[in-house]
Image (cartoon, rainbow, N blue to C red):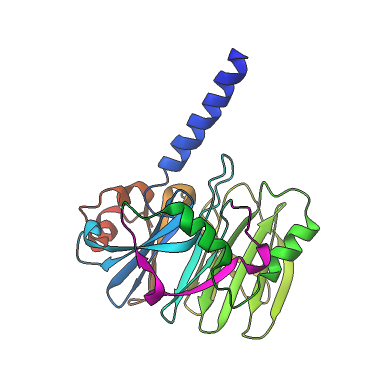
């Protein structure tokens, strides 16, 4: 019994160390009109940070998102989100009994978000996330769950451009792209892809870029094309998508824990690409 307890404690502590090493924010930072957007996960629910790129992170406004992601002890799945046309798009992946995979893809106007404070009732937003508006049904999730018995190595992310929603799903060492063109979902061919860690998407230079956890980079056109490697571990990295300068940077994830710095200072001091 003691041996089992020690093993479980080690697993728990290992998971906590791994998660804390990620840094404050999940997956990426978006810059648009000299404003930065980043998401922190608290008790599964997303907290959107919005502030000036020239001011300390601590000066940012914070808003509670009715969507989020659970923390798996193995194979971390960060929050899948993007912003387009003053709307936040996200896949709700929280652990809640009323969650429906078909309605897990959320589209939430930014001006509808409520301010986050220490008194914000997280459980209320876990419930709201299950029923929040969902303009587009997440059929790619339904097919994935229908065709796969185990989900331990399920990873996904989204990128939005205009009316188009790109949802990439990787499982069992394969990856596929789904595209919502404003009317229907279209599915690409399936391509080999290692699924031992998460990947991230960015719509950059008129292409959808896929950055694997290993740092390997691909673009998706009519096929899945490798374009090189960042040669660093993406699980310890934040992707910074600057839509003002049309550039893509990568910074150390734990650098964002210093909230006295601005995003501009983070880029200047901690860019690793």
Q: Is residue 108 magenta?
A: yes
Between residue 129 and residue 265, name the one nearer to us. Answer: 129
Residue at screen point 58% across, 22% down: 7
For the record, the magenta segment spans 96-117
Does 5 sit above or below residue 154? above
Q: Where does residue 195 sit, x and y in percent of width and height?
A: 64, 51
Does 1 sit above or below residue 191? above
Residue at screen point 59% across, 78% down: 135
Between residue 65 and residue 217, name the one nearer to us. Answer: 65
Query: Which quadrant is the C terminus positioned in?
Result: bottom left
Query: Which quadrant is the N terminus positioned in?
Result: top right
Does 215 sit above or below residue 161? above
User: In the figure, residue 143 lies in which quadrant?
Assistant: bottom right
In this view of the protein, can residue 230 be seen by the observer?
A: no
User: In the figure, residue 63 lies in which quadrant?
Assistant: bottom left
Left or right of 104 in this view: 260: left
In this view of the protein, can residue 18 be seen by the observer?
A: yes
Does 259 sit above or below residue 169? above
Q: Where does residue 16 sit, x and y in percent of width and height?
A: 46, 36
Between residue 200 and residue 246, name the one nearer to us. Answer: 200
Q: Where does residue 119 sit, x and y in percent of width and height?
A: 33, 52
Q: Is residue 67 magenta?
A: no
Q: How many labels were placed on the picture?
A: 0
Q: Where does residue 191 sit, x and y in percent of width and height?
A: 71, 63
Residue at screen point 41% across, 79% down: 86
Residue at screen point 36% across, 55% down: 120
């Amino acid at each position: 019994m003691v041996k089992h307890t020690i093993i479980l404690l080690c697993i728990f502590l290992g998971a906590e160390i791994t998660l804390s090493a990620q840094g404050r924010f999940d997956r990426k930072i978006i810059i648009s009109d000299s404003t930065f957007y980043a998401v922190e996960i608290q008790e599964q629910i997303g907290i959107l940070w919005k502030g000036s790129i020239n001011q300390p992170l601590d000066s940012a406004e914070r808003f509670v998102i009715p969507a989020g992601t659970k923390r798996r002890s193995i194979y971390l799945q960060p929050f899948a989100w993007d912003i387009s046309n003053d709307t936040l798009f996200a896949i709700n992946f929280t652990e809640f009994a009323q969650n429906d995979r078909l309605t897990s893809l959320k589209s939430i106007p930014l001006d509808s978000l409520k301010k986050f404070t220490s008194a914000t009732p997280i459980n209320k937003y876990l419930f709201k996330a299950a029923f929040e508006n969902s303009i587009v049904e997440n059929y790619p999730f339904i097919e994935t769950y229908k065709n796969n018995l185990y989900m331990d190595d399920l990873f996904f992310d989204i990128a939005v451009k205009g009316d188009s929603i790109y949802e990439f799903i990787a499982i069992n060492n394969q990856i596929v792209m789904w595209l919502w063109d404003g009317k229907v979902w279209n599915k690409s061919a399936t391509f080999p892809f290692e699924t031992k860690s998460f990947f991230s998407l960015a719509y950059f230079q008129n292409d959808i870029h896929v950055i694997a956890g290993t740092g390997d980079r691909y673009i998706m056109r009519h096929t899945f094309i490798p374009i090189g490697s960042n040669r660093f571990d993406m699980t310890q990295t934040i992707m910074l998508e600057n839509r003002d300068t049309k550039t893509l940077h990568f910074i150390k994830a734990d650098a964002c824990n210093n909230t006295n710095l601005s995003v501009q200072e983070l880029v200047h001091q901690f860019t690793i690409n």
